[in-house]
């Protein structure tokens, strides 16, 4: 495992962090975690040198923290820095903050959380944190030994990101970043801005919800033309680790094979590893992706459950598969096989999902786009 300096803190973080948002499942239900497999994966990663484990209150319908807590028993907790997040959208008073932190400590079976984040900050949620004096609350929790360090994860525009960065001497933050998102949300400019402030930057969505792991055939051809042979996953991850501003990269691994593959790639990572020609290859991949103009869903599942039962991420996945890979008939067949309530056509346009989407997607409009693609043929 390769290690990097974690901002100004006295901590060398593993290049690869374990993101617990996409743990293995026994069924299609997000709460139905395969605990045995998940615990095996997390512990194996730690045994191979991973020392940063990230979860959050809503992951897997509230079950994610429980499973992570079980995985960190038997001495594993002492081997890692544990990160989780406050569900800002659910708090309305500092007493709510106390209540959620207490609940999370119990779920995680620990007496302290090393890195505690205000989850998914945007303009409105940051305003709420300011109004509730959330930073003062966090500092008291740090004094009590319940939190090691306070930070935030982010989904909004670059101007808002800089405003939040400048508002407090944060030791770290977490942003969505990959070779498609250099100009999206915080983006490359935000990454460098925070790093110049001495902040550690934790990267989430390095593979854009798996889209950069499974490339459309026409994009895969770009890699076939490169003299350097790597998997799409390796290209995406090594591009991130090539940058000195990146402290650690979280991967939401769902299979044991993904854990082993990512560990191997992480062991090869270095700052300034890629040649100018390899960086140009990444630029070509980005340009080709942009031409496809898919629905920019990362399958984070924050939009679920839908009040009417629509499986929003699955609908978007099938749409992207149809138009990125050219396998329209197969995707169309899979759409028709969905239970009626899970289809895009069951959307009531209540807008509940739009408020939760960190990508800012106009979900009802996009679901209508799916309906037009798959039913109006």
Image (cartoon, grey):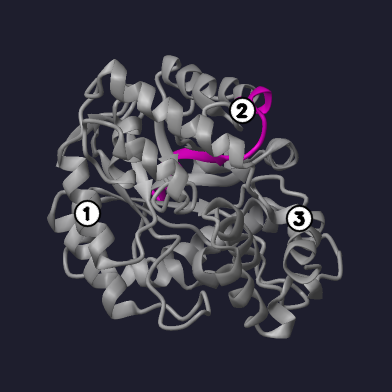
Q: Could you say where residue 332 lies in the image, as x and y percent from the top left?
A: 64, 71
Earlier residue among tags 3 and 1? 1
Q: Is residue 304 above or below residue 32?
A: above
In the picture of the structure, the residue carrying the numbered disc 2 is 161
Task: Compute the Cα span from label 3 to label 2.
Answer: 26 Å
Task: Tell me the tag on residue 200.
Answer: none
Q: Quadrant of residue 273?
A: top left
Q: Could you say whether the residue bearing mark 1 is in a helix, strand or loop? A: helix
Q: Is residue 64 above or below residue 273?
A: below
In the visual, does 25 lie left or right of 4? right
On whether residue 156 falls in the magenta region, the answer is: yes
Dot 3 and dot 2 residues touching (CB under 8 Å): no
In the picture of the structure, the residue carrying the numbered disc 3 is 366
Q: Is residue 166 above or below residue 282?
A: above
In the picture of the structure, the residue carrying the numbered disc 1 is 261
Task: Compute the Cα span from label 2 to label 1.
Answer: 32 Å
Q: Residues within 10 Å of mark 1 (few under 14, many from 20)?
A: few
Q: Nearer the viewer, mark 3 or mark 2?
A: 3
On whether residue 302 falls in the magenta region, the answer is: no
> Can residue 8 be seen in this snapshot?
no
Q: Quadrant of residue 363?
A: bottom right
Task: Compute the Cα span from label 3 to label 1.
Answer: 34 Å
Residues shaded magenta: 142-161
Q: Could you say whether the residue bearing mark 2 is in a helix, strand or loop? A: helix
Dot 3 and dot 1 residues touching (CB under 8 Å): no
Q: Residues within 10 Å of mark 3 (few under 14, many from 20)?
A: some
Q: Nearer the viewer, residue 168 or 304?
A: 304
Residue at (58% x, 43% y) in the render: 137
Q: How many marks?
A: 3
Residue at (38% x, 36% y) in the render: 222
């Amino acid at each position: 495992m390769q290690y990097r300096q974690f901002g100004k803190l006295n901590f060398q973080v593993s290049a690869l962090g374990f993101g617990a948002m996409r743990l293995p499942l026994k069924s299609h239900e997000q709460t139905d975690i395969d605990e045995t497999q998940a615990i095996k994966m997390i512990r194996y990663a730690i045994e191979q040198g991973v020392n940063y484990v990230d979860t959050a209150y809503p992951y897997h319908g509230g079950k994610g923290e429980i499973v992570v807590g079980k995985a960190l028993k038997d001495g594993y907790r002492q081997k890692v820095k544990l990160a989780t997040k406050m569900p800002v959208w659910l708090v309305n008073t500092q007493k709510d903050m106390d209540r959620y932190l207490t609940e999370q400590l119990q779920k995680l079976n620990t007496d302290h959380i090393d890195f505690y984040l205000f989850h998914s900050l945007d303009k409105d949620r940051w305003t709420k944190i300011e109004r509730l004096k959330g930073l003062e609350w966090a500092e008291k929790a740090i004094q009590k030994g319940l939190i090691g360090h306070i930070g935030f994860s982010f989904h909004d525009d670059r101007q808002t990101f800089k405003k939040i960065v400048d508002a407090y001497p944060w030791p770290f933050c977490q942003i969505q970043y990959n070779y498609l998102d250099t100009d999206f949300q915080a983006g490359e400019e935000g990454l460098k801005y925070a790093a110049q402030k001495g902040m550690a930057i934790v990267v989430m969505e390095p593979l854009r919800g798996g889209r950069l792991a499974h490339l459309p055939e026409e994009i895969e051809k770009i890699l076939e033309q490169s003299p350097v042979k790597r998997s799409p996953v390796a290209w995406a991850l090594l591009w991130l680790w090539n940058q000195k501003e990146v402290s650690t990269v979280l991967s939401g691994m769902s299979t044991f094979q993904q854990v082993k593959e990512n560990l191997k790639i992480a062991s090869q990572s270095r700052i300034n590893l890629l040649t100018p020609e390899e960086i140009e290859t990444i630029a070509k991949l980005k340009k080709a992706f942009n031409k496809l103009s898919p629905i920019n869903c990362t399958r984070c599942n924050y939009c679920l459950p839908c009040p009417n039962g629509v499986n929003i991420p699955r609908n978007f996945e099938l749409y992207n598969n149809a138009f990125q890979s050219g396998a329209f008939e197969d995707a169309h067949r899979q759409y028709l096989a969905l239970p009626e309530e899970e289809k895009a056509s069951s959307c009531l346009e209540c807008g509940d999902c739009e408020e939760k989407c960190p990508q800012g997607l106009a979900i009802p409009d996009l679901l209508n786009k799916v309906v037009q693609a798959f039913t109006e043929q």
